[in-house]
Amino acid sequence: MTGQPEELHTPQNAEEPPEQPSGEGTGDPSAQMVEAAEVPADSPKAAPKHADAAAELAAAEEVTSVTATPQDPPTNLAPTTTDRLPTTTSPAAAAAAQAPALPNPVTSPPAPPVARAQVEAEATPTKASAPAPPAPPVSAASAPATAPAAPPALPSEGLVPGLPEVDATEGDEDELDLAEQAALAEFEGGVGLAAPSLNEGDRREGVVVSVSDDGAVIDVGGKTEGLLSSRENPPDAVAALTPGQEVDVIVARLGELGEFAQLVFAREENSEAWDALEAAFRDRATLTGKVTERVKGGLSVEVGVAAFLPGSQVALRADHNLDEWIGKDIEVRVVKLSRRRGNVVVSRRELLEEELKAARDAVMAQIEVGGVVKGVVKNVTSYGAFVDLGGVDGLVHVTDISYGRIKDPTEALTPGQEIEAKVIKLDRERSRVSLSLKDMLPDPWQTAAETYSEGGRVSGKVASITDYGVFVEIEEGVEGLIHITEMTWSKRLKHPNKMLSVGQDLEAMVLKVQPAQRRISLSLRRTAPDPWDGIEARFQTGSIVEGRVRNVTTYGAFVEIEEGVDGLVHVSDMSWDSQPRNPKDLVKKGQTIKAVVLSIDPDERRLSLGIKQLEPDVWEKFFAIHTVGETLVGRVSRLAKFGAFVELAPGVEGLCHRSEMPPKEAGRKQSVRVGESYYFEIIKVDELDRRVGLRCSSYDPVAPEVAAVAAVEGAE
């Protein structure tokens, strides 16, 4: 027999050989394969000849199972070798019983001659691929002798890569050939014959499963069945369907888990319309279509076939009222097309954006920096106004609306207002144009130097108040600054708002004009007389004045004797006490006191005052009463390394040097003690430097009553 191994050829009319328990001594190839099955594959006793024969028989069986048809039944049906195997419980016999049945070379039809090379190549095992699982044993004796053999099932791994396994138990006798399988797989968009998952817009050929009043359930080959609803499709057409009927449908919407996919009847394909759409899609041509209805997410437009226009592609900005477009003819462009699925997506926004870009390019080509353009105010914001220049928007910033101070652009501009503005900045790449309205008017600062001279007076209105001063609007677009130091002659002003308010009219003096910097310095206090002018005529040295304590520091107190004139009372001029004291212990802020004018310096604007000068000079009085050689009672006020300071009278201290003290007595730690009164002799007097030198005659303190009398006499 052609295509079979020579050693396996057996005449068809040969008688059945007698049964052999183990198959030894026979030429039956099946028995030889049983013997090979009892020997482990890795055993050195395994015959290569048996292995090659088994591989060739297995490959021949695969080819036979595919090529055999019901019209070519086998001529002879004989029991297979496995039916003649004896029953045994040995491991080798069990392995042989479980081995796949080998075809009988007598009963199996011959393989085509061209398939042998392919069979041998596919039967050769490789390291990269695992051997195919064995087919279940089939007994030829159980089949009727006259009935044709049933078509064998396709193996689990098909002969054509990529095609899935076909279950032969479904009773489908009309099998597809390889070309039909590939065409079906390409049409359905899946792999092999497996049904792909459903997508909205897919066109499917389904089978009617059942029909009810609500619609027809259609098997479209997906993971779920679809519903051809009577409400979304012609009811008569749905009712006319019968179970098992094939129908073309389109997936309108996918259902949730456990729900039907919503289907609609597929329209008959208009080849001419689709050809025109494909050409328009390829050439990016513009089509005119009519809006027929509103659908989920957009509109349906008739352009030869029903096309989908998403809501975001209707206009340049989102249009929330899509119903007003129904029945209108619009121009669109095809942006997505699938003829197989019957899907067409169009866009109107893409055409509008191209028209807008063309208009912008035309406008931008005519605009130049410094030129004057006309436009319409579109929108007014807190920082300026947008002006439509005919496809391009220009911005007029709030600072470019007027030379004057504008807080809110709505004070000068309103939407819909036609204006002329000057182009001050241009960015062609970003299509940005900066405009100015104030540049259409003459700049008032160009004539400010001639209009306002230094030393002159101007009238204005307070425009704004800051911590450091006040801005005064002299005219529209020209403002001057009054610094806080130029608001009043007094130094008591903490904040400008304590003196002025926004909108208040005033008169000020021009101090300095700087047109290049657009600055004018003004003064309010200089419109009033300077209080320091003629101060020496109003206040003479030695005169007594009265004022309010404005501030107290560590070195003295400032007293305001009139508006804009402050005098300083130094701490040394507050009391005749020889020991300095804290000024806050003597005077308080806001207190009204009297003082003596000690000195005046109009150029430096300084005035020195004294409080202790209101009382007689205790030193002059002391020198007038006491002389050298006189012994007095004095109280030790403080000690030093070189001696002791002794208070002889209020405000008068003398020094007793340690050399003028008697020798220390045995066991005595110190000579005199602070706070104790002793007898001291005056040994030196310096009226110019106001110094008194003393000598201590005894370390014995005087009696308290004597010290009290001496203190009273010294005070008098």
Image: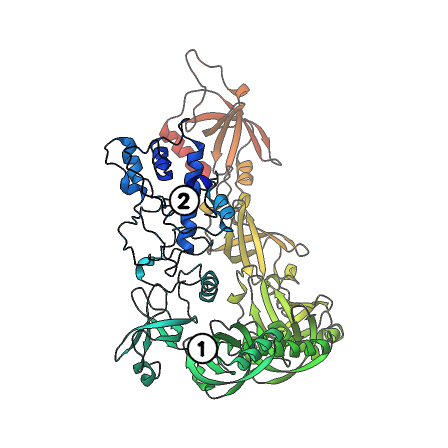
Query: Which residue occupies the foreground of this view, 191 or 531?
Result: 191
Q: Which mark is residue 537?
A: none
The colour mode here is rainbow
Q: Where is residue 113 shown, x and y percent of the image?
A: 50, 50
Q: Which mark is residue 58?
A: 2
Query: Which residue occupies the foreground of this view, 330 or 602?
Result: 330
Looking at the picture, does residue 454 appear above or below residue 116?
below
Displayed quadrant of residue 215: bottom left
Q: Secondary structure at mark 1?
A: strand
Identify the amino acid type marked 1: Gly
Quadrant location of the C terminus in the rendered image: top left
Query: Does residue 478 show up?
Result: no
The answer to whether 570 appears left or right of 41 in the picture is: right
Query: Separation of disc 2 and disc 1 at Cα?
Result: 61 Å
Q: Where is residue 298 shown, x and y percent of the image?
A: 45, 77
Q: Where is residue 76 shown, x and y percent of the image?
A: 34, 51
Query: Does residue 576 show up?
Result: yes
Q: Residue at x 66, y 73 (%)?
A: 433
Pointer 1 residue: 298
